[in-house]
Amino acid sequence: MNNDEKIELARRHWEQLSSYESLLRSDRAKLVAGIDEAGRGPLAGPVVAAAVILPADCMICGVDDSKKLSARKREFLAQQIKEQAIAYAYGVIDQKVIDQINILQASLLAMLKAVKQLSVQPDHLLIDGPYQINMALSQTAVIGGDAKSVSIAAASILAKTYRDSLMVEMAEIYPQYDFAKHKGYGTASHIQAIRQYGICPIHRRSFCGKFVSGQTEENASIF
């Protein structure tokens, strides 16, 4: 495949992912924000949401569901998104709140926080997943949205790269858990570290109890 063919393929992919945005803009929703989160499944660290408003005339080749991209590609695209976006913002909900209200409610709260942090108010929200968020803005929940909407895909990339950077920082504070490698997900090595060292302050206690032999939420080892 030559360069012209690659460019044409990228253009068609961008147009396909922009169908939700194009339809909304034709219905007078000039500013469409995509919202997605990263970190629902890990045993440690926060859940992070991102909200992104892209201009109608931009095209960032390679934007896709963050799970389909390498870490290097995500970092490159995150920079492109931030440079071209009309506005973007993050919402971060830490492990303590996750334990208090559950991960679903924490994820929705992170999304709400991200939208409220935007420097301009969008006309419509495209939200990844089956749920809407608790605010008086026109919004659409899109199941599998990070593979169907360019705005949600862009948000998924920003949320993932931001959360990964936080977990790399945490790896320096708690090196025994190797957070830089697994980003807090329940890998075999991470579970083994929990069993060996107990849980640390950024672990989600409600997620980790079954891995800490003989310890309850109240008496689990804390560093």
Image (cartoon, helix red, strand yellow):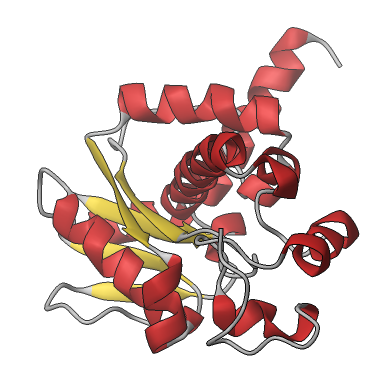
Residue at the image point whose x is 65% and y is 19% from the top: 7
- In the image, taking residue 133 as reference, residue 80 lies left or right, namely right
Q: Place residue 3 in its image quadrant.
A: top right
Q: Residue 145: percent from the left, percent from the top?
A: 53, 64
Residue at the image point whose x is 67% and y is 77% from the top: 208
- In the image, taking residue 101 as reference, residue 120 lies left or right, namely left
Q: Residue 172: percent from the left, percent from the top?
A: 58, 34
Q: Place residue 105 in its image quadrant.
A: bottom left
Q: Place residue 140 in its image quadrant.
A: bottom left
Residue at the image point whose x is 61% and y is 57% from the top: 147
Judging depth in this view, the residue of 107 and 60 nearest the camera is 107
Judging depth in this view, the residue of 167 and 2 nearest the camera is 167
Identify whether 69 is placed above or below 16: above
* Quadrant placement of the C terminus: bottom right
- In the image, taking residue 170 as reference, residue 139 lies left or right, namely left
Identify whether 159 is placed above or below 12: below
Judging depth in this view, the residue of 127 and 209 nearest the camera is 209
Look at the image and tell me whether residue 88 can be seen: yes
Look at the image and tell me whether residue 28 can be seen: no
Q: Residue 159: percent from the left, percent from the top?
A: 46, 48
Q: Residue 45: percent from the left, percent from the top?
A: 52, 58
Judging depth in this view, the residue of 152 and 97 nearest the camera is 97
